[in-house]
Amino acid sequence: MKLNHILPFVFTIVCRAAPASSSSISVDVTVTKYVDSSSTAYDWSEDWIKNFPIHKSCNDSQFNQLSNALEETQILAAHARDHTARFGNLSKFYQKYFGDAPSGEVVGWFENIVNSDKSNTLFRCDDIDDNCKLDGWAGHWRGENASNENVICDLSYTSRLYLSQMCSQGYTVSKSKNSLFWAGDLLHRIWHTDSIGQGVVGHYADTYDECLKLAKTNTTEAVRNSATLRYYALDVYAYDIAVPGKGCTGDENKDSEDNSSSTTDASKSSSEAEEGTECHTHSNGETHCS
C-alpha cells in the first residue's frame, strides 16, 4: 500500500476511567487511522511519458543505437536549456544566435525536448513511406501521413556520431553539418512534430552564416529557427562540456578564411560531397535537403 495514496482520518474517542471515589474522570484520546484511497486519488502525472517511444519495427541493434541517441538528444537539450537559464541573453553564444531576444522562448523549446509528454510521438525503423530507398535519405518526418512520427533510415546508423566524440575528427560547429551528431539530427526531426515543434519551430535559415545573419535581422524568427537552435545547443555543449572553456566553434579565423583561395573552396566542396546530402519532406510536400 503506497503511502502517497493514504489519507489520514482523525477521530476522537471519549474514555471513562473506573471511579476513583464518588466521581468519574473523562479522558479525550485522539486516534489517527489511515484509509487507503488509491482507487479514487487523482494523480496529475499519471501516464506522463518523458522518453521518446520507439516502434517495434526497430531491431535490437537499431533500438540500442536509437535509444542512446534519443537520450543524448535530451542531454544536449537539457544543457542548452540550463546554459540559457544560467546566463540568459547575456551569454555570448546566446547573443550570437538570438541577438537581444528574450530568453524565455528558447528555454521553452529545449524544455519541451526534455520534459514534455512524448506519448503521441514515435520513431520508426520501417520504410513505411518508401523514402529510405532514395539516395541520401537518412530519415524523414512523416508529415501529413503521421505528423508526430519520424522514420530513421539505415544511413543514420552508419553516419552519426555521439556526444562523446564532440570536437574530435576535425569537427567544428561552424564548418560541419549540424546533423553529424545524432543529437543534432534528432533535434531537427523532433521539432518537426506537432507535439514538440507545435507548428512554430521551422526553417527560417539553414546554414551557419544564415543563422548568424538572422540573429541580427529578425530575432523573432531566430528563437524559432530549427537550425539556429541546433547550432546553439551544439556550440554551448562543446564549450561548456566537451572542451570546457574552449569548445570547437571553428570560426576564429573566419576573416582570413573569407579571403582564402579558390583551392580551399574546392576542397570544402569536395568534403561536403563526401559527407552526402540528407533530405526530408515537409507537410506541404516540399523536400528539404542539407
Image: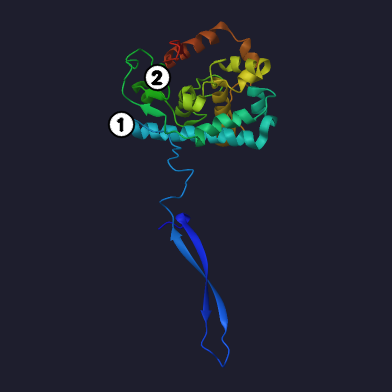
**Residue sitting at 58 percent across and 89 percent down?**
23
- Image quadrant containing the N terminus: bottom left
Q: Quadrant of residue 275?
A: top left
**Residue sitting at 35 percent across and 15 percent down?**
131
Residue 142 image label? 2
Lateral position of residue 54 relative to residue 253, left or right: left
**Residue sitting at 42 percent across and 40 percent down?**
47
**Residue sitting at 44 percent across and 60 percent down?**
35
Asked whether 180 or 85 is in front, the reply is 85
Residue 31 in percent (x, y) is at 51, 70
Q: Which amino acid type is marked by label 1? A: Lys
Q: Which amino acid type is marked by label 2? A: Arg
Residue 34 in percent (x, y) is at 46, 63
Which element type, helix, strand or loop, lies under badge 1?
Answer: loop
Lateral position of residue 258 relative to residue 130, left or right: right
Lateral position of residue 83 relative to residue 13, left or right: right
Q: Residues within 10 Å of mark 1 (few under 14, many from 20)?
A: few
The reply to whether dot 1 and dot 2 touch (C-beta < 8 Å) is no
Asked whether 160 or 138 is in front, the reply is 138
Is residue 169 in sight in this rendering? no
* Residue at the disc numbered 1: 56
